[in-house]
Image (cartoon, rainbow, N blue to C red):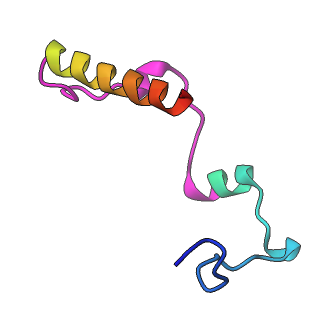
Amino acid sequence: MTSSNPEWLPERHTDDEHVPAEEQARRQGVRPLTSVDELVVPGMFESDEELDEFLADLYASRRAGMA
């Protein structure tokens, strides 16, 4: 199935059903970050080497998208 197949496309909502992002966030209890420290996940990487491998892969995938 391709994106040009109308059966695959998501149903479009009318303007009456549109909910602004700010309202969606309020309904879901999303709040702004007060510090980047809130993004820290202790133990995400088991070692500095694992982090280095992750970053190398991330940077390589970003460069590949530019080619």
Residue that appears at 18% across and 27% down? 43
Q: As drawn, which residue projects farthest toward the front?
A: 67
Q: Is residue 14 above or below residue 45?
A: below
Instruction: Tell me which corner region of the image, top left, top right, bottom left or bottom right, holds residue 17.
Output: bottom right
Residue 47 spot, x, y in % from top left: 13, 18
Left/right placement of residue 12 relative to residue 28 reads right
Q: Is residue 10 above or below residue 41?
A: below
Q: As drawn, which residue projects farthest toward the bottom?
A: 7
Instruction: Tell me which corner region of the image, top left, top right, bottom left or bottom right, holds residue 34.
Output: top right
- Check residue 44 for magenta coloring: yes
- Check residue 65 for magenta coloring: no
Q: As drawn, which residue projects farthest toward the left?
A: 46
Residue that appears at 40% across and 21% down? 59
Residue placed most toward the observer, 63 or 58: 63
Residue 13 spot, x, y in % from top left: 77, 76
The tally of labels here is 0
Left/right placement of residue 8 relative to residue 42 reads right
Left/right placement of residue 54 relative to residue 49 reads right
Residue 49 spot, x, y in % from top left: 15, 15
Left/right placement of residue 65 relative to residue 9 reads left
Q: Main secondary structure of the magenta part?
A: loop
Start-end of magenta stretch: 27-47
Q: As drawn, which residue projects farthest toward the right?
A: 15
Residue that appears at 31% across and 26% down? 57
Residue 44 spot, x, y in % from top left: 22, 29
Residue that appears at 58% across and 40% down? 31
